[in-house]
Amino acid sequence: MAANMYRVGDYVYFENSSSNPYLIRRIEELNKTATGNVEAKVLCFYRRRDISNTLIMLADKHAKEIEEESETTVEADLTDKQKHQLKHRELFLSRQYESLPATHIRGKCSVALLNETESVLSYLDKEDTFFYSLVYDPSVKTLLADKGEIRVGPRYQADIPEMLLEGESDEREQSKLEVKVWDPNSPLTDRQIDQFLVVARAVGTFARALDCSSSVRQPSLHMSAAAASRDITLFHSMDTLYRHGYDLSSAISVLVPLGGPVLCRDEMEEWSASEASLFEEALEKYGKDFNDIRQDFLPWKSLTSIIEYYYMWKTTDRYVQQKRLKAAEAESKLKQVYIPTYKPNPNQISTSNGKPGAVNGAVGTTFQPQNPLLGRACESCYATQSHQWYSWGPPNMQCRLCATCWLYWKKYGGLKMPTQSEEEKLPPSPATEDPRVRSHMSRQAMQGMPVRNTGSPKSAVNTRQAFFLHTTYFTKFARQVCKNTLRLRQAARRPFVPINYAAIRAEYADRHADLSGSPLKSKSTRKPLACIIGYLEIHPSKKPNVIRSTPSLQTPTTKRMLATPNHTSLSILGKRNYSHHNGLDERLMK
């Protein structure tokens, strides 16, 4: 029962289609609708198959940069199968939320931020484990680095220079260095400094009383005093004290110039009520992603202003009140939900009396083979036996997967083994650069298209594919000798039925018992020149009768009609017979 219990914060599989892979989501909320059903508000994750090829190239480039900086196992040390399966474990985080029925949950999984200090093989060794390092925005189709990554390396840590010796000059550019704003070894005591800060707060309160806009925002005296006691007033007073050499009389005169008392405001006072409401709405949607908050809600504010306002906003009563409301809402919402085991997949190929039904489950294309073991192999592992088969891909492709590969397809969104389309993505070898070789390649291979679908039925190529059918000599001979067993016309009408190769061999062995132990020679040996000269002496060639006609202006000149030399026996169509064409000796046919 614990396996079917799902809580807020779990990473789960969602099924939105019986033939497509599962969706990977994180449960944020569990809400009960008016009809009594449970809906889950989830955070979306995307696979590599869900984004464009341009973004996949950017993701691969980012992965190579991580490999160069890390000291763990690099991709070059992995096998082709491990590289292929590792791509199925990579996800892309998004800020998109959606609501899905809780009854579509099909199991739990684990998603973690890519750990740069851990080997990538650790993700392959664990079942239902995924990783992510980039954030995908489905609205604008972009990939960005996750803000939560641990920034370790020379790009983020500063190099500490060596300490200067006595009398050695500092060659660094002083304008780019920090500026000293406070000296702890000042002549003033701590009590004198605190008294000066009290005077600065009083001047700030009086300045707000004189300012019309401030009197509207802080109508009471205690609100004005609280605003004057913020850090902005203290920083200004301490900086003034330092700039005047800790001279109290000179610093106090600067606090109250000729134009009136100095008013120092921070972001809490500069922002209006409408801007504060926009910030709270953006914070509810994006969290602490200040770049998105600035881009979508507050483009006229600087990033520094937004960050400073956030940390000041957390000290207000408004933040405490919202935190209490969220806690009360969380108590009233569902904490967990029980989802029973789902019913069998409709793509499961039905069986009756131990014989498999339709290969692809399509209506009108059912086919019952004579032997249930004689069927199409699994498209992933090429296994011919499985306790259960599932139709995979378009119905006209007649493809199927075994139970193990079907579960891998649903969870990881791909096939276990790398296929031909994966090999075509590799850089071409120098041998294929020859134009004579390239002319024999298929159009899909020349254009970089996959010849066979490996990840999704959507990417199947609908155009014609060039192929070369090579017929062996044994097959050519079997067409003539074993016509009763082979039945070419019936086999052509049922192309997916395998030919009983053993029966044809048995019939051939019965008819040619004396030759069953020795293989047939596929090509006749070349006779010596003396035998050929003797044959020509016995059978001299006849001169062809050439029909000549007198050319005229009315009738065109007739072509020469040459008689075909009869060196061998000819078939009905005047061509070489089967035995002569295939190099079989006449005495073997008798």
Image (tube, helix red, strand yellow):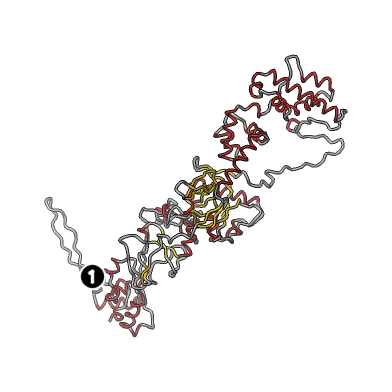
The quarter of the picture where the C terminus appears is: bottom left
Residue density around tag 1, few if under 14, some if 14–19, many if 20 or more, within 10 Å: few
Q: Residue at x 45, y 57 (%)?
A: 454
Q: Which amino acid type is shown beneath numbered disc 1?
A: Pro
Report the residue that reaches farthest toward the top.
258
Instruction: Indicate the position of residue 156 as horizontal and vertical percent values.
Output: 68, 43
Secondary structure at badge 1 equals: loop
In the figure, 483 relative to 189: above or below?
below
Image quarter (top left, top right, bottom left or bottom right) of the N terminus: bottom right
- The image shows residue 442, relative to residue 215, as above or below, that is below
**Residue 329: x %, y % from top left:** 57, 43
Near-viewer residue (518 or 460): 460
Label 1 sits on residue: 565
User: Is residue 525 something one can see in this rendering?
Assistant: no
Q: Give me the residue at 72% from left, 25% from top.
A: 225
Q: Report the number of discs.
A: 1
Q: Is residue 421 above or below residue 503?
A: above
Q: Nearer the viewer, residue 532 or 525?
A: 525
User: Closest to the observer: 571 or 342?
Assistant: 342
Query: Where is residue 572 drawn, in percent x and y?
Result: 20, 70
Q: Residue furthest left?
A: 554
x, y percent for residue 99: 49, 46
Position of residue 26 in the picture relative to residue 435 (left or right): right
Q: Is residue 217 visible?
A: yes
Q: Residue shown at 35%/58% (left/top)?
A: 396
Task: Name the residue at the bottom extreme.
Answer: 514
Residue 264: name its quadrant. top right
